[in-house]
Image (tube, grey):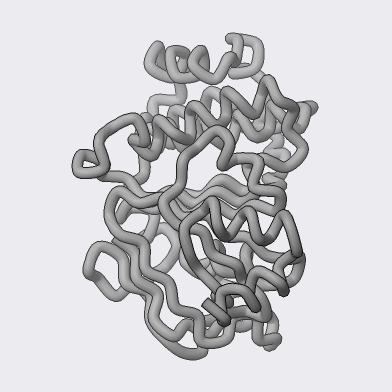
Amino acid sequence: MLEIENLSLEVDGRPVLKGLDLRIEKGECHVLLGPNGSGKTSLLLGILGFPRYRVTGGRIIFKGEDITDLKTAERVKLGMGLAFQNPPVIRGIRLGDMVSLCRGDKSGEITEETRDLAKRMHFTEEFLERDVNAGFSGGEIKRSEILQLMAQDPDFVMLDEPDSGVDIENMELVGEMIGSLLHRRELPSRRTASGLIITHLATITNYVDVDWAHVMLGGRIACSGKPDRIIGEVMEGGYEKCVRECQMS
């Protein structure tokens, strides 16, 4: 599904990724851990082609196509979707309108299909009438982001810290819907969507099963392995110890 080869990336002239390699197969879900400033969010925005994130080396391959030079809109059309950690308030656009647009409906009406999706995320009609993220709590913002992804139904789902600032009740719902987006209830051979999840505390892995875990340090993937091992080592001794243990094994 996604292959990143020796990717180097800079933001405003500052190097943030340094020869990064990552491969995510069709139907897989990977989780990426690392300290602040290690380049995790930059990786997601680089994959999606945000203009500030300039590729200085390497390639991004998606569904067998080199997308390194494609614009963001073209990558979205190919099937990429992203839930931001801290999305902005968008004045003048109702949440219901945004969800309908994500579904490809340009009628300007909040459709019954949009209402049905909103109900799955426990959003009432009132929320659909409100400006996107305006006055939303932390949990409501996360649910709003997941709702938009559900409407878009991408083949490759990227989630930037979906477990930050979310209480247990909202986390269970967010985890359930992420699992649905990624077809995690299906047999592995029947899963057609893939995902990459950024997390600090790995709380999301209590609600969404993942196939592989990675630790990112200094703009590179420093170690990779099965989630239980990698997350356990990070929780026990921190990122540096986890990397040392990987290098020794």
Hey, which quadrant is residue 207 in on the image? Answer: top right
In the displayed structure, does residue 186 sit left or right of residue 202? left
Number of labels in the image equals: 0
- Residue at figure coordinates x 60%, y 67% from the top left: 215
Question: In the picture shown, does residue 243 fall above or below 201?
Answer: below
In front of the other: 152 or 175: 175
Question: In the picture shown, does residue 118 fall above or below 191?
Answer: above
Question: In the picture shown, does residue 100 fall above or below 217?
Answer: above
In the displayed structure, does residue 200 sit left or right of residue 216? right
In front of the other: 106 or 165: 165
- Residue at figure coordinates x 66%, y 24% from the top left: 170
- Residue at figure coordinates x 37%, y 60% from the top left: 75
From the top left corner, tell me how far across and down residue 134 is, in percent.
Answer: 75, 30
In front of the other: 110 or 239: 239
Quadrant where the N terminus is found in the figure:
bottom left
From the top left corner, tell me how far across and down residue 4 is, in percent.
Answer: 40, 75
In front of the other: 156 or 49: 156
In the displayed structure, does residue 2 sit left or right of residue 161? left
Q: Is residue 173 visible?
A: yes
Q: Is residue 94 visible?
A: no
From the top left corner, tell me how far across and down residue 82 is, in percent.
Answer: 51, 50
- Residue at figure coordinates x 75%, y 63% from the top left: 237
Hey, which quadrant is residue 51 in on the image? Answer: bottom right
From the top left corner, tell me how far across and down residue 174 is, in percent.
Answer: 57, 29
